[in-house]
Amino acid sequence: MSLETIVEALERGELLRKAVAITIDDGMADSLRHAVPILVRRRMPVTIFTVTSVIGNDDLMWQHKLTWLIAQGLGDKVMEAMGVEGFPPAMEGQSVEQYARTNYRADLPEILESLVRATGSTGPAIAGKARPYVERDEMAQVDAEFVQFGNHTHTHAILANLDEDAQRAELTQARDVRREITGRLPIALAYPFGLKRHYNAISRRLAAETGHRAALDARRRLNLPGVDPFNLSRKPAPCGSQQQFEQTIEDWPDNAAINPTRAEG
């Protein structure tokens, strides 16, 4: 089913059994160019949760800037710069990625951009060359019967680390950009990273207040009949290649059996 169909059924109090929705996060270019054609051929709807600040490849997401800096051998510079800016000391054995996620602040993307600029490049320049994200015209031209776009915030911020005003700005700016491109409001918010520590009660309340009808985490829980649409959970279906993704879809539903003794609650 489409995520919208599931949410509408939950709003009516209907009991759904073995309902499955396919979602893809971030808005990477291959989601529309590779995954969507595979799904549409099989008449399977999908919701893509895009990060709106990078649509059109105007910039890199902050975590991709971090990955790029680490690949350049500048992980220590990231830790040093965060320390200078008053971030707490790293825990023993903590990786740069773990340290950045644990201590995320609203100014972290700017700090990372300053480090990228110090190398003679910029986030927008890297994104403009590699073009890893979806384009506006691609989003506007999709078949809305099979492809919808959800809210994944404007910058992929860790919402729990932001105050209420900053969280609201992340949700409303992303909502408005998406509506401008597609002409539709996003039905749902997917929390970036999606574990319990990455969002809070304010995030959930703001999801409703900003016009969303559902909110999704990534905590791998089962969604039992009667679940609150603002407490939906997802399980990852990791695929390392287009071929693996296509095989996953092709084998449905044979690969969907759940062992009751191992099901996650």
Image: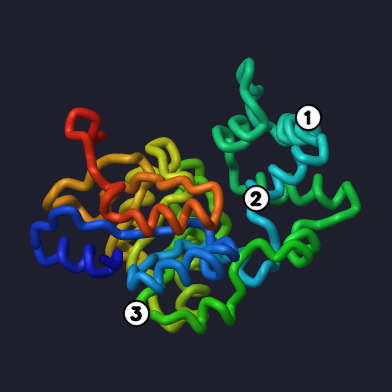
Question: On screen, 140 above or below 231?
Answer: below
Query: Closer to the camera: disc 3 or disc 2?
Result: 3
Indicate how the structure is coloured in the image: rainbow
Disc 1 residue type (three-letter): Asp
Residue that badge 1 annotates: 76
Q: Nearer the viewer, residue 42 or 8?
A: 42
- Residue 222 percent location from the top left of the image: 23, 43
Q: Residue at x 50, y 84 (%)?
A: 141
Q: Residue at x 39, y 59 (%)?
A: 23
- Residue 119 percent location from the top left of the image: 88, 48
Q: Residues within 10 Å of mark 2 (few under 14, many from 20)?
A: some
Query: Closer to the camera: disc 1 or disc 3?
Result: 3
Residue that badge 2 annotates: 62
Question: On screen, 5 above or below 179?
Answer: above
Q: Would you identify the image quadrant in which residue 46 lies? A: bottom left
Q: Secondary structure at mark 3?
A: loop
User: Which mark is first along the chain, 2 or 3?
Assistant: 2
- Regarding residue 265, the answer to whether it shows in the image is no
Residue that badge 3 annotates: 145
- Residue 113 percent location from the top left of the image: 76, 51
Q: Residue at x 59, y 65 (%)?
A: 29
Q: Nearer the viewer, residue 21 or 195?
A: 21
Q: Do labels 3 and 2 touch, CB within 8 Å?
A: no
